[in-house]
Image: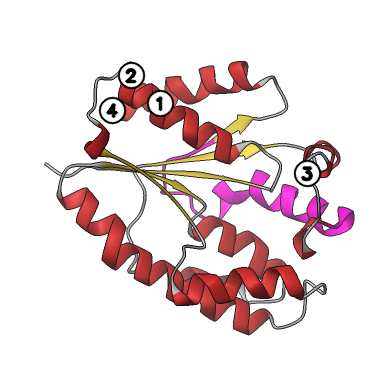
Amino acid sequence: MEGKFIVFEGVDGSGKSLMARMAKEYILEEKGYSLDKVVLTQEPTNSFFGRQARDLQKTDKNPLKNAEKCFDLYVKDRLNHLRYLIEPALQMNKIVLCDRYKYSTFVYQSLQGINEKKIIEMHETMRIPDLILVFDVRARIALERIGNRGTLEKFEEKEFMEKVSRGFSGIKIHFKKENIKIIDAEKPAEKVFEEVKKELKQII
């Protein structure tokens, strides 16, 4: 029996990373899994490609610049992530919680001008998660949260963030056969996580 692959998605400031951490604690403490059976990871990773992608994101202030390069780096990083961490963990019956996956690439890079069909085709052979949790929050609220964290990156300008937020809200249209759940992330974290737990209980 293979493990479970669960993805946490949403615009920066949606609380997805917090929910991923809370999910790990819940699986360990309430579901009784041992520490070695739960993997919390994120994209971009710390691979050569992932580091390049992060550096480009931090230094390139124009979201439309170097779109193809960004896309190429994210795809290569994801393939590396799957090969060396995600797939081996699942084969060992582990639960993999991943902060961002192909859905972020679809939303962000399509807004950068990369063809949607091309993005989908590049991911056709990659593993489909057992559950995708998308945390829905308006750009204004996301930016308020990000503002409390410090410096904004290139993808966090208001107009662009509004497009990103809409992109995540409508992501199910593009991946109709996948188990995507949209969660209202504007509520307090404890209320949001109650919704997360309901979805987790369906597959764990």
Q: In this view, does 177 lie above or below 58?
A: above
Task: Please name the predominant secondary structure of the magenta segment in the image.
Answer: helix
Residue 70 picture quarter: bottom right
Of callouts 3 and 1, the N-terminal one: 1
Label 1: how many Cα within 10 Å (few below 14, some 14–19, many 20+): some
The residue tagged 1 is 25
User: How far apart are the two marked residues, 2 and 4, measured between alpha carbons?
Assistant: 13 Å
Label 4: how many Cα within 10 Å (few below 14, some 14–19, many 20+): few
Q: Which residue type does callout 3 highlight?
A: Ile
Kind of element beneath mark 3:
helix
User: How far apart are the two marked residues, 3 and 1, measured between alpha carbons?
Assistant: 24 Å
Of callouts 3 and 4, the N-terminal one: 3
Left/right of residue 50 with respect to residue 62 in the rendered view: left
* Quarter of the figure with the N terminus: top left
Front: mark 4 or 1: 1
User: How far apart are the two marked residues, 1 and 2, measured between alpha carbons?
Assistant: 6 Å
